[in-house]
Image (spheres, grey):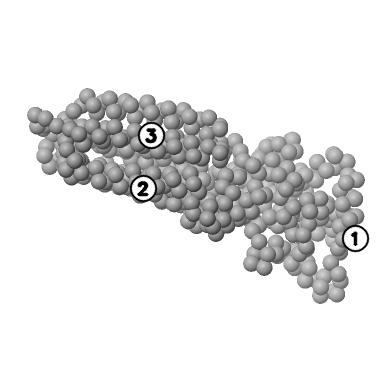
């Protein structure tokens, strides 16, 4: 075991040291505590149901054997323990290939799989162990777990065996990543299929799209603008908000399973990113809509800055990220976005509805608000997975739909803003005696 430990890269060894220093604490410790208590209730070892104690006993039974053969079986036994938490296959069996091979070998030899008797003796062995020995075995399991994660040999697990800090949506029954305290493993998981795959890719691709669009806009010739530097800074604020929001989001969904601490830090960045997107969206819209009324433009900009900072401040509280506050989170950001109703009404009242919907691009703004609010409602109510628990685990669950609607909403907003910019370019920098535009 020591030799195996030394083969690990230095970083993995550090993870191990930090997790084995106190069994039951740290990202791995909490995962194994969770497994010992509830996860193994779902284990099916050797094709039969096994209780938590039996699961543990199964591992230890092989470990305590002293022959060379037992050393080999130790690995396969603990491998079962680590991988038997994967989603059930169609016939409901949780056997992995090693266990299946072993069972087939025994059947060929006409031997019965060692059943209850041996299991009972395993139980006794486990129960008879000193706490120190039990802790030692727990550490060995952790070491193997880090090894497997490091090598990318993890499998998806069902919701009810997740540690509490990874339990977010109990309508997604299967296909979750296990806790993986390695950034390398988390980033490699981008290319695997699990509950977060859609969440990661929707915002990763969205981020690249806005990065490309933003660069195109920034490199447009200055002759396409009436105030090139100012306009590029203002539109650049929107792109910065969108890129920050989408990149914080895909990063959060990628490293969410790393550990409780990392998940907390990135969830705060994720929520702050939504506030950045909303604040960044207001800037060019207010700038062009109140081109000829700088005072209201400045006041509304300051108001959204203060409200956005308040939302970022609330996002830093630990309670804000908990599943119970899902509705509150949706409410805070919908409220922040809806603060745009005041400048919109101001614009409609002073310019008239027709001018507001044509030149003022209110139709596009209304569509953007509809997309964002629909996304927030799906997110808060967890639709559609609430109606089809276990059917939307990988694709089309509420969070993915919410992500798609956010990218669509941001693009619709950009379209409206670029129409406003085009209008400004067409009429020139000058202002009529009255009006905001
Ligand atoms: Zn998200």
Where disc 3 sits, the SS reads helix
**Residue placed furthest toward the left:** 433
Q: Residues within 10 Å of mark 1 (few under 14, many from 20)?
A: few
> Residue 409 at what x, y percent from top left?
34, 46
Task: Give the residue at x 57% y 53%.
Answer: 172
Q: Is mark 1 within 8 Å of ligand 1?
A: no
Find residue 89 and report its horizontal and vertical position in percent: 64, 64
Residue 20 lies left or right of residue 301; in this view the side is right
Query: Nearer the viewer's eye, disc 1 or disc 2?
Result: 2
Gap between marks 1 and 2 measured at Cα: 61 Å
Q: Residue at x 24, y 42 (%)?
A: 362
Instruction: Kindly identify which numbered label has been placed on residue 336.
Output: 3
Q: Is residue 416 left or right of residue 409?
A: left
Residue located beneath label 2 in the image: 371
Q: Secondary structure at mark 2?
A: helix
Horizontal side of 238 relative to 427 (left or right) equals: right
On the question of residue 47 being in view, the answer is yes
- Secondary structure under the numbered disc 1 in the rendered image: helix
Mark found first going from the N terminus, 1 or 2: 1
How far apart in space, not on screen, are marks 3 and 2 (Cα)?
15 Å
- For marks 1 and 3, the one nearer the N-term is 1
Q: Earlier in the sequence, mark 3 or mark 2?
A: 3
Mark 2 crowd level (few <14, some 14–19, many ≥20, 10 Å Cα)? many
Image spot of residue 90 (x, y percent) = 64, 67
Tag 1 residue: 117
Identify whether 131 is placed above or below 50. Answer: above
Answer few, some or many: residues within 10 Å of disc 3's Cα (few below 14, many 20 plus, some between 14 and 19).
Answer: some
Find the distance from the CA under tag 1 to the CA under tag 3. Answer: 64 Å
Say which mark, if any, is on residue 154.
Answer: none
163 or 178, which lies in front?
163
Residue 290 in the image: x percent, y percent?
Answer: 20, 32
């Amino acid at each position: 075991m020591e030799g195996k430990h030394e083969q690990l890269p230095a970083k993995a060894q550090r993870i191990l040291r930090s997790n084995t220093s106190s069994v039951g604490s740290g990202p791995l410790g909490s995962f194994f505590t969770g497994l010992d208590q509830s996860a193994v209730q779902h284990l099916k070892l050797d094709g039969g149901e096994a209780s938590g104690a039996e699961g543990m006993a199964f591992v230890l039974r092989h470990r305590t054997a002293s022959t060379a053969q037992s050393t080999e079986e130790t690995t396969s036994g603990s491998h079962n323990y680590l991988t038997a938490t994967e989603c059930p296959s169609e016939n409901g069996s949780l056997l992995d290939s090693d266990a299946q091979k072993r069972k087939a070998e025994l059947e060929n030899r006409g031997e019965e799989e060692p059943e209850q008797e041996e299991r009972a003796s395993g139980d006794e062995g486990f129960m008879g162990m000193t706490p120190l020995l039990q802790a030692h075995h727990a550490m060995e399991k952790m070491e193997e777990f880090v090894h497997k994660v490091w090598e990318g040999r993890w499998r998806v697990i069902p919701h009810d065996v997740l540690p509490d800090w990874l339990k977010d949506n109990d309508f997604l029954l299967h296909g979750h990543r296990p806790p993986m305290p390695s950034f390398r493993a988390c980033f490699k998981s981008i290319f695997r299929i699990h509950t977060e795959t859609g969440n990661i890719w929707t915002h990763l691709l969205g981020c690249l799209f806005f990065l490309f669009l933003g660069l195109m806009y920034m490199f447009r010739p200055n002759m396409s603008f009436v105030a090139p530097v100012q306009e590029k800074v203002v539109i650049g604020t929107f792109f910065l908000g969108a890129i920050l929001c989408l990149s914080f989001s895909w990063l959060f969904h990628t490293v969410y399973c790393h550990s409780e601490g990392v998940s907390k830090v990135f969830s705060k960045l994720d929520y702050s990113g939504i506030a950045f997107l909303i604040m960044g969206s207001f800037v060019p819209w207010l700038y062009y809509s109140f081109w000829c009324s700088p005072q209201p433009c400045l006041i509304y900009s300051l108001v959204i800055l203060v409200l956005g900072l308040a939302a970022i401040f609330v996002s830093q509280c630990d309670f804000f990220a908990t599943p119970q506050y899902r509705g509150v989170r949706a409410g805070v950001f919908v409220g922040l976005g809806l603060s745009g109703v005041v400048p919109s009404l101001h614009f409609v009242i002073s310019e008239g509805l027709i001018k507001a919907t044509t030149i003022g691009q209110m139709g596009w703004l209304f569509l953007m608000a509809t997309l964002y609010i629909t996304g927030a409602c799906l997110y808060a109510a967890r639709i559609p997975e609430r109606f089809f628990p276990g059917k939307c685990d990988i694709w089309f669950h509420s969070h993915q739909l919410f992500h798609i609607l956010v990218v669509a909403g941001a693009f619709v907003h950009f379209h409206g803003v670029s129409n406003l910019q085009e209008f400004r370019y067409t009429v020139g920098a000058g202002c009529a005696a009255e009006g905001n535009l």
